[in-house]
Image (tube, helix red, strand yellow):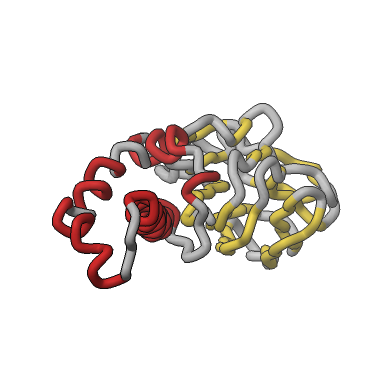
Amino acid sequence: MFVLLPFLCAAVSLAELTTLHKGRNLTSMEERLSYLEKTIVRRINATERVLGQLLTGRDDADISALNVLALRSGMLASPSEPVLFSAYKSSSTSGISSKVTIRFDKTYINLGNHYHTEDGIFIAPKTGVYLFHWTIATGGSAFSSQLMVGGTVRASNLVPYPGGADSSSAMVILNISEEDHVWIQLYGSSEHVYGGRNSEGNHYQSTFSGILVHTP
């Protein structure tokens, strides 16, 4: 604001100052200086309103309450690192029952390391809209796979009895809060989930992936 003062003062020219008394009948130097002060204050207030709107995008912004250093830091900061992961089971598991977390123990990519291979849980680093996709490969009986968020079923998918080896996939887009825990579990009894290094040969892959697509 202080940087703008010289420009605002200059805007009220000497010519204006010397002729103020003619149009407004200002008869003393004190009155002229008072009028000049009010004019400068009015223009500063108008400038603050415009700057507040430009810096924050809000019509009611009060620039005097803004942390200018924080605003400058935010404007110059580099874009935040993307949040995404893609994990898979490296080996098959049998005898899985309801509410048991499927541990996808290897990752293709895990930017930010927010997916944890040791327990199969993704912990959201920030609030936003996330996309999740998972595939369960099996050769056993029919069962359901469930995407859990903080202990609540937020999406599910039927894994039908294939009569042989097959897989079933699902995708969902959800609002997730910071620090929410997200994982995949089964609803069934003594189920079998395939795992493998890749999709070549007789390796059947079960995978779990997620990406942050939007932040508020």
The quarter of the image holding the N terminus is top left
User: Residue 133 or 180: which is nearer the viewer?
Assistant: 180
Please report the residue visible at 72 percent of the width from the left and 61 percent of the height from the top. 154
Q: Residue 156 vs residue 72: left or right?
A: right
Q: Residue 134 vs residue 84: left or right?
A: right
Q: Position of residue 101 (x, y in %)?
A: 75, 43
Please report the residue visible at 37 percent of the width from the left and 35 percent of the height from the top. 77
Please report the residue visible at 77 percent of the width from the left and 59 percent of the height from the top. 153
Q: How many marks?
A: 0
**Residue most toward the top?**
118
Q: Position of residue 164 (x, y in %)?
A: 61, 59
User: Residue 173 or 188: which is nearer the viewer?
Assistant: 173
**Residue most toward the left?**
15
Q: Position of residue 210 (x, y in %)?
A: 53, 49
Q: Quadrant of residue 39?
A: bottom left
Q: Quadrant of residue 90?
A: top right
Q: Quadrant of residue 181?
A: top right
Q: Can residue 51 be seen by looking at this rendering?
A: no
